[in-house]
Image: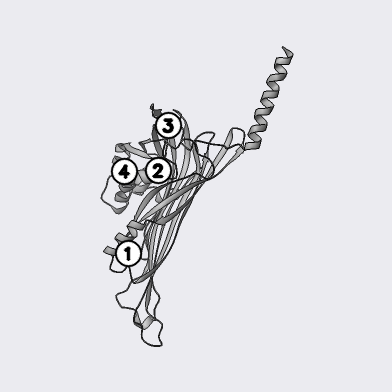
Amino acid sequence: MLSGKICGFVVNVVVCILFLTAGCTQTTNLALKFTPEDSTTYKVTMESQRSIEWMGPLPEKPSSFTGGRTGNNIETTFTQQILSTDDKGNASAEITINSLKFLREIRDKVTLDFDSSREKDANSPLGKLIGQSYTIEITPDGQVSRLIDAGDARAAVLGKSSANQTAIHLLSEDIVKLRHTIPALPPVEMDKLQAGDNWRNTNNFSFGMMGSKSYERIYTLQEIKGIGNHQTAVVRMEAYPSVEAAKDMQGTNPLSNMYDNIETYTGTLRLDLSDGKVAEYSEKLQTEWVIADPNPKAGEVPSALKMKATRLYSIEKID
């Protein structure tokens, strides 16, 4: 009996040595996990900005030119409670809005500034969103497959004012999906990933007179760090304009050969593998165009326009 135990011990030691010699590759499944009645609070920030600036000599500036910054900045804190799950791992979740900040600018002029933490904003139509709930269906790969119900929340903010219409817009299916989708997660069939593995998807943006662009986002699992059962996966994202989309843009945009374009589009995901929840995710696109007069007067600085656009999405687990 003793010799048998010793033999087993020796076998285990040999196996361990073989693993150490060959190297041990750690694999993981990057997916959301849902447990009925579980509750988590998140903060989401969404920003969409664009600006235009005259860079040429002031005497050459057209009298009709109006520059400045235009866009929205939205910060929402909400509690997500899992109501139920199905056999595919999808979850029905109730989202309750806890706080909201909304800032809109048009050509450097603030047209709507709401902050639910300010007493003076309590009677705003946007203030009626606080405490309202809607339900969505979320998949393990971070997609919002559908907006199940937002009827009561929409009814609470009905009205014709700009603030009412903004509140209703924040409850539209497209905006709800943007708010809760985690695009950095891999497809469900990629269930055994190791450091260095990557996957990709595309994202499209419209830039007004500068046309539209499609970007290929490439996600790479950088590392899995932590101790014991509490581990975190770190994913980095880099994105590049789609080659085919760039060809289409050049064919449809008459300005495409007149400007220089500089852009960066990056992101980072931290996924808590112990509970299958996003600790934080952010992605930011910054792009800039400069259009210069192709035939400037001799000895003069050429007239030019600089246009910028920013798109930001971030989500952070706060409780």
Q: Residues within 10 Å of mark 4 (few under 14, many from 20)?
A: some
Which amino acid lies under the numbered mark 4 shown in the image of this protein? Glu
Q: Which residue is mark 1?
A: 210
- Per the image, label 1 sits on a secondary structure element best described as helix
Q: Which mark is residue 188?
A: none
Q: Which residue is mark 4?
A: 173
Going from N to C along the chain, the mark reached first, 1 or 4, is 4
Q: Which mark is residue 181?
A: 2
Find residue 289 and report its horizontal and vertical position in percent. Answer: 39, 67
Q: Residue at x 46, y 48 (%)?
A: 219
- Per the image, label 4 sits on a secondary structure element best described as helix
Going from N to C along the chain, the mark reached first, 2 or 1, is 2
Which amino acid lies under the numbered mark 3 shown in the image of this protein? Ile
Q: Is residue 218 or residue 307 the one in the foreground? A: 218
In screen coordinates, is 303 left or right of 223? left
Determine the image quadrant of residue 249. Answer: bottom left
Going from N to C along the chain, the mark reached first, 4 or 3, is 3
Pointer 1 and pointer 3: residues touching (CB < 8 Å)?
no
Q: Is residue 311 or residue 15 the one in the foreground? A: 15
In screen coordinates, is 147 left or right of 190? left
Q: Nearer the viewer, mark 2 or mark 4?
A: 2
Which amino acid lies under the numbered mark 1 shown in the image of this protein? Met
